[in-house]
Image (spheres, helix red, strand yellow):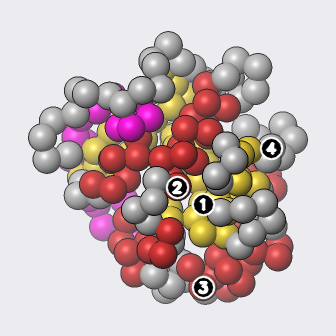
Amino acid sequence: MDAEFLTDGTIWLSPPAVSDIDAITALCQEPSIGAWTTMPVPYQRADAEKFVYDIVGPGWAGRSPTWALRRFENGPVVGMIGLSPLYPRRDDDTAEIGYWLSPAARGQGLMTRAAALVSGVGLDPTTLNFERLEWRAFVGNHPSAAVVRRNGYHYEGLLRGGGLQRGTRRDIWVAGRLRTDPPTPSHNWPAGV
């Protein structure tokens, strides 16, 4: 698949480029990003290089796209969002949505907008053609849960010890959205999630 540039007129999504490596490195120094992701901590420039060269390019070729979130076209990176196969790969019709956002960009609805664009293209039979998108997050990541809840993902449960973060097993929340689910907020989430 060719790299896609997505926008809703408020945010712009484009494939992370070599020119973004320094910005990605700087943003990933934020402790709250490392706390909720599986990225290396501490995050080094070499990690950003590996991400851009070894994950982004091959990912687009293999139906595993990553977009940099920008506030304006060709603007600096403020976050990252992507779709990736579930590991171990269970089927070719399901992908996992994942994202992070810099603290300065939080609380403005930017990631909710990005997730709407990515979910739409992910489930569209004429583009990525996934039948199901799945979200997983370490228990307690309420802002991440709010993003997918607003985008029609249904809460599906808790996997005890279901995630591995830098050698430590952690509980995770799971939600999913089927192609047939509307993109409107889901109301089946339990209190406290």
Indicate the secondary structure of the residue bearing disc 1.
Answer: strand
Residue beneath disc 2: 110
Compared to residue 36, the image places residue 30 above or below, namely below
Q: Please state the horizontal and vertical placement of residue 34, each as a whole percent of the image.
A: 43, 74
- Which residue is the extreme one toward the top? 180
- Which residue is the extreme one toward the right? 2
- Residue stretch rendered in magenta on the structure: 149-170
Asked if residue 34 lies left or right of residue 127, the reply is left
* In magenta segment, residue 4: no
Compared to residue 94, the image places residue 57 above or below, namely below
Residue beneath disc 3: 26
Q: Residues within 10 Å of mark 4 (few under 14, many from 20)?
A: some
Label 2 close to label 3 by CB (< 8 Å): no
Q: Please state the horizontal and vertical placement of residue 146, each as a whole percent of the image.
A: 33, 47
Q: Residue at x 60, y 60 (%)?
A: 80
Q: How many marks?
A: 4
Indicate the secondary structure of the residue bearing disc 3.
Answer: helix
Residue beneath disc 4: 4
Q: Please state the horizontal and vertical placement of residue 37, each as a whole percent of the image.
A: 43, 64
Label 3 close to label 4 by CB (< 8 Å): no
